[in-house]
Amino acid sequence: MLALGMAAQGASCVFMYGLPVLIPVLRGEGLTLAQAGMVVGAPSAGMLFTLVLWGWYADRRGERVTMSLGQGLAGVVLAVAAFTSPSVPVLGLMLGLAGALGSSANSASGKVVLGWFPAEKRGVAMAFRQAAQPVGIAVAALALPGVAAAYGLRGALAVLAGICIVTSLLVAALVVDPPRGEPGAVADGGNPYRLAQLWRIHGAAMLLVVPQFTTAAFTFDFLVGRGWDPGAAGRLLAGVQIFGALCRLACGRWSDAVGSRLRPMRQLAIVNGLTGLTAAAAIGWSHRLGPGLLIAALIVAMAGNGFAFTAVAELAGSAWAGRALGVHNMVQNMVGAATPAVFGAIIAGAGYAPGFAVAAVFALIAVFVTPPEGRRVRTQPAPA
């Protein structure tokens, strides 16, 4: 179940977040940089409109049908885009529709993990699920440029369609919906949004997106501006994505070991903010450790992503987890979509050091927004 949930999540991430590697191909097709940016950002924009709806559907109809239906329909839309050669506006709309459909995995795959893993192992399991995002981006970076060079944009879109359709068939054939009911959930089957704790987790996660997306968006440009070879910088950041996925697994194990999601989340936010401020200071003073500290800040910023997701799922329980995870994904992606533009303007006006420093302050604010521990995670299996 974990492998299938990861596959569904990773398949959606390949085309939602991996399309930027096709920007040179899109420009070769005659698109301007602005048009190419619109096209590659369309799946992420489309996803925002349906995350909560897919979460509601998963709560009502189950995880298997939700993931397989959304992935299959996304694959069909991508296949149509591959074989019809639509105009730029139509291509953007089709990719946005594919993102809206493929986002089904974002909510339903988390519910599969919540339902099939006991609390004392759920942190690691959710960390594996969260690791599907950087792995999916890495797959896109490795596979799509070569396919596009050989077969053009249509070939790359056809490969993406095939990934989604094959994943949909595997999910439909093999996923078993977990048992309903989570009596250990803090919400006890009721509406979890009557609890201030859930709102604070959403808020803290939104704040932590800012340093994560700022370092992810501008580290490459910073390194190239400091004289790095673009190919070497790209390979380094691809390796950082894989290492970041491993760090997410380590953080999941950490939360299982201490029986808490929120305490490690708060502690890592402190490290996140201090590392970012240190990197900004080194960059401002043109210290030779600046690039290394910036890479460290990027890794720390992405490492704890699973804490909040696991806490939200456990707090909501199986009756509400789909909708709660949908809301969580939506607010994080809204902040993530705005962060590069806002901090691009800050960096353009004031420089890299102030930009990275301001982003790090958001992590320190998240320390105080993260709620105190509620009910502890059970560290022993419940009786059958």
Image (spheres, grey):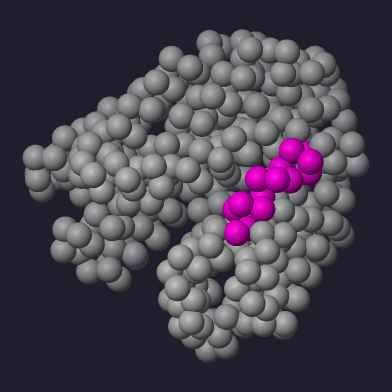
Q: For residue 319, what is the image quadrant?
A: top right
In the rendering, at what x and y percent does residue 118 appear?
A: 72, 29
- Residue 292 is one of the magenta-drawn residues: no
Using the image as rendered, state which of residue 19 and residue 8 is in the foreground: 19
In the rendering, at what x and y percent does residue 321 appear?
A: 75, 31
**On the picture, is 277 further left or further right than 121?**
left
**On the picture, is 28 further left or further right than 214?**
right
- Please say whether residue 157 is visible from this viewpoint: yes
In the rendering, at what x and y percent does residue 142 appear?
A: 48, 71
Q: Is residue 197 above or below residue 322?
A: above
Q: For residue 98, what is the image quadrant?
A: bottom right
- Please say whether residue 255 is visible from this viewpoint: no
Using the image as rendered, state which of residue 116 and residue 279 is in the foreground: 279
Q: Residue at x 74, y 18 (%)?
A: 192
Looking at the rendering, in which quadrant would you find the C terminus?
top right
Q: Residue at x 72, y 59 (%)?
A: 97
In the image, farthest residue toward the right = 61
Q: Is residue 376 above or below residue 177?
A: above
Q: Magenta region, mostly helix, strand or loop?
A: helix
Q: Which residues are magenta?
A: 42-55
